Image (tube, grey):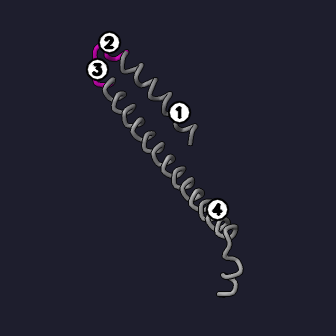
Amino acid sequence: MIDFLKTYNTVGAWTLIVAVATLIVTIMSYRYTRKRDKKNKIEKIRRKQAQIQAMEEGLHWGVEVSAASHLRVEIAGLKAELEQLKSEL
C-alpha cells in the first residue's frame, strides 16, 4: 500500500482526487438545493390555498360591493400564482 502511494503521489493524481471530491460535493449540493426548492414551493402552495380559502369565506359573510370585487381580483391573482407554482413542481 505504501509503495502504491509513493508511486502515485503526483500532482496529477492529487488533482484527480480533488476533482472527484469536488464533483461529489457539487452533486450533493445540487440535490439538496432542488429538494429545498421543492419543499419551499409546496409550502407556498399551501399558504396561497389558505389565503384563497380565507378570502372566499370572507365573501360569504357579506362585504361591500367594492371590497367584494377587490377580493375577487385578489383571489383570481392567487389562483393564477397557485397554478404557476403547481406547474413548476
Between disc 3 and disc 4, the foreground one is 4
Tell me if residue 49 comes above or below residue 5 in the rendering.
above
Of label 1 and label 2, which has the lower sequence position?
2
Mark 3 and mark 2: span between their CA atoms? 9 Å
Mark 3 and mark 4: span between their CA atoms? 65 Å
Quarter assignment of residue 27? bottom right
Q: Amino acid at mark 1?
A: Glu
On the image, the x and y values in percent for residue 75 come to 42, 25
Apparent side of residue 42 relative to residue 27 in the rendered image (left or right): left
Span shown in magenta: 60-69
Nearer to the camera, 43 or 58: 43
Residue at the location (61% across, 65% down)?
18
On the image, the x and y values in percent for residue 88 come to 57, 39
Q: Amino acid at mark 4?
A: Ala
Of label 3 and label 4, which has the lower sequence position?
4
Q: Amino acid at mark 2?
A: Val
Residue at numbered disc 3? 62
Residue at the location (49% across, 30% down)?
81
Q: Mark 1 packing: few (<14 Cα in 10 Å), some, or many (20+)?
A: few
Of label 4 and label 2, which has the lower sequence position?
4
Tell me if residue 23 comes above or below residue 89 in the rendering.
below
Residue at numbered disc 4? 19
Nearer to the camera, 59 or 6: 6
